[in-house]
Image: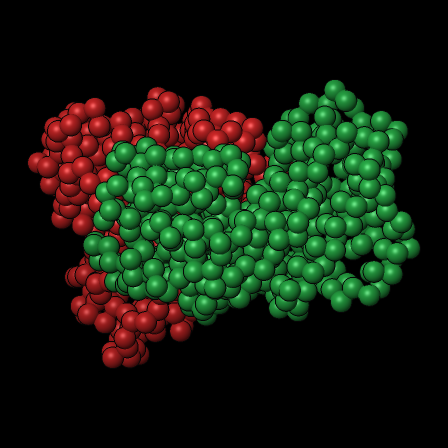
Chain colours: A red, B green
Amino acid sequence: MTQTTTITRSDCEKLDQQDPLAALREEFDLPAGVIYLDGNSLGARPKAALQRAQDVITREWGTDLIKSWNTAGWFDMPSTLGNQLAPLIGAEVNEVVVTDTTSVNLFKAIAAALQIQATDSKRKTIITERSNFPTDIYMAEGITRWLDRGYQIQLIDSPDELPQVINDSTALVMLTHVNYRTGYLHDMAAVTALAHQHGALILWDLAHSAGAVPVYLNAANADFAVGCTYKYLNGGPGSPAFIWVPARHQEAFHHPLSGWWGHASPFAMNPGFTPTPGIRRALCGTQPITSLAMVACGLDTFGKTDMQAIRKKSLALTDMFIALVEARCASHPLELVTPRQHQQRGSQASFKHPHAYAVIQALIKRGVIGDYREPAIMRFGFTPLYTSFTDVWDAAEGLRDILDSKDYDANAERNAVT
Amino acid sequence: MTQTTTITRSDCEKLDQQDPLAALREEFDLPAGVIYLDGNSLGARPKAALQRAQDVITREWGTDLIKSWNTAGWFDMPSTLGNQLAPLIGAEVNEVVVTDTTSVNLFKAIAAALQIQATDSKRKTIITERSNFPTDIYMAEGITRWLDRGYQIQLIDSPDELPQVINDSTALVMLTHVNYRTGYLHDMAAVTALAHQHGALILWDLAHSAGAVPVYLNAANADFAVGCTYKYLNGGPGSPAFIWVPARHQEAFHHPLSGWWGHASPFAMNPGFTPTPGIRRALCGTQPITSLAMVACGLDTFGKTDMQAIRKKSLALTDMFIALVEARCASHPLELVTPRQHQQRGSQASFKHPHAYAVIQALIKRGVIGDYREPAIMRFGFTPLYTSFTDVWDAAEGLRDILDSKDYDANAERNAVT
């Protein structure tokens, strides 16, 4: 923490003037006086989302009623949105559906992977990280406990262990591409190749990657992926999640959540289940249309730029935030837990501090919204679509002032749910 | 089909004038010139739903952002709505959550029931009706195939078979309370008692009961129930479903969809799953808040009446529709498939006709919206909150005129998705 920096707020203003993405901020409704660095928890609201929801509610639901399942494309919406999302994650058309929750989609993918691997009875291990988002581990726990066929979950403490632990007893490697706490970004192609070398399948959770960093699922030859639309994709609170199954795995993709939306003839009302060909076999039941429809508004803003431009700005934003905080808060016990190397960094910067929770609360009071994650981590997400370089300056400056003036309640106890 | 009736449209107008529920129609936005008899597929839009969604989108999401998980009650919403819904189905506080889809909730309940029954290794049968809504059967298929422990699904062709087939090898009886096609209403208390007599558990699907007929889950001593909020409860297109687990079963309620929302400490981010005490262990992942929030608007309208008043009007509406159709369309090959006995009838009336699909299309063209269900069934749902007696007259009269004048395309092929 001995870095210095000569960056000034006026330098940031200049960067904003030169920023090719600056105009995209106008696509979003952000409250005045707020610097929002929590788009990795809940993305900001695209202005268009209100009109879209009003249209679903008044015209499609209110006036056209059940006809809208056909005429407004409700029934096809998981596929339509999946196809719109596909290019952001390096997927092809008809490989993604937007549906259900990330947890439920994890369940489908883990179940399908174990079934594919069941031909090799020695493959009994699911490898994941202890630091993975807990629901990923919980869903694997749920499946393995219920199947009761000797599956084990092996938790590793560092990505460096992967070459040692993946072997011919590995059924599935299940990793979150960008760690929710630290922002550590896995090398998807290298880890996928490593898994395949040993005959393991790999499932990537893209909750903190989709819309945040370029993702090339097919180029990496990945096996399955799931992800979230309400973070960097700005789909709205709790908007449905997505699941990707590449064409080569679709025929073998079987999961126990065999509901009518995944049936080959959902309206023939036959009592026996026959999965539909293609990605729609990953569907299960009727989807929450109003929440689902707004996902398009978030995706539409990505159509006005590309993931390369987003990545370039994302790294510039996180580089600057790290440099400013380390230089200007150098006298305080802050520890960067996000990798410095670009190729290992998602679109966030996280710092440890003994009073992390209290400091985050003080920042929020001043309109700088980051969040807290156990243990003792202040997490700041950077969304290039609506975050400016002056936002970064002002956030770092707010943090410096709070720390310098000790303007936080060192006894604050965590009681929030987000 | 030799009934006659002396009812006139003016009688219906008088009934509307005397109808204590007539004013509730004003709570709903229904398109002009439409008689909507498809509330059993997608309930009409409560006017309040638009304002509620706008508030979620602009204020809760747009302005308050992640704070809304706490301040707007987003995280608690499955419970808040569950408690609001509970009295409509004879449930207690903290026994219902509104979450996920009916299919996913069926999966949880079937899995939990099988686990409870697993202490008795001879209980290997799930009994249900061949005519049950297919997704119920598909979800049971998904679980049993995947557990691969010798569970069998036994399909019966008539409720009369239940006393013969339920025995001490029955693990679970899984029935839809009101049949989606015929409107047949099971005697919940009697069938539950029959199941319990043989040590079986019972799971009721209330998709066509909740908000349609009085339901007394606790009084019937039922074991589990799931249901839908987008039909008679008017929650909006694809609005999240519900699951009921009575207090006495909650501690033993375990299911494999063990996501973080069902964890005892969801924000401690521990890598091991510990289910939360109480009904919230039936939750899994993050819910679609905008769609979920509007469920309250549908439920609010029920607060202005009660299920007894709704049932009284429902039976009067279906009685009248049956009487009018059978008297005025007596020369046509219509066959009532809905029970005539009140205690066996839900809130719908279904008729078979050789050209059922074509006739329904012709009715829809005239603004009378019912729907078609395989095989050859015209289905009409009656929602006492917004359906009037003159609606019933006009619908029956439209049907008569179409049949008398053969104003339908007898070659029409079904191609719709609803």
Residue furthest out toward the left? A164
Q: B4 left or right of B273?
A: right
Q: B345 left or right of B388?
A: left
Please tell me in which quadrant of the rendered image residue A254 appears: top left
Q: Residue at x 63, y 34 (%)?
A: B373
Q: Nearer the viewer, residue B185 or A409?
A: B185
Q: Is residue B368 visible?
A: yes
Image: B73 above or below B142: below
Which quarter of the rendering shows the C terminus of chain B? Answer: top right
Please provide percent x and percent y for residue A307: 41, 38
Q: Residue at x 81, y 30 (%)?
A: B332
Q: Nearer the viewer, residue B266 or B216?
A: B216
Q: Is residue A222 visible?
A: no
Q: Residue at x 34, y 60 (%)?
A: B249
Please provide percent x and percent y for residue B40: 63, 47
Image: A60 above or below A417: above
Residue furthest out toward the front? B164
Q: Residue at x 73, y 47 (%)?
A: B36
Q: Nearer the viewer, residue B259 or B339?
A: B339
Please provide percent x and percent y for residue B411: 74, 20
Please tell me in which quadrant of the rendered image residue A68 appears: top right
Q: Nearer the viewer, residue A400 or B416?
A: B416
Q: B58 left or right of A133?
A: right
Q: A219 left or right of A295?
A: left
Please provide percent x and percent y for residue B367: 79, 41
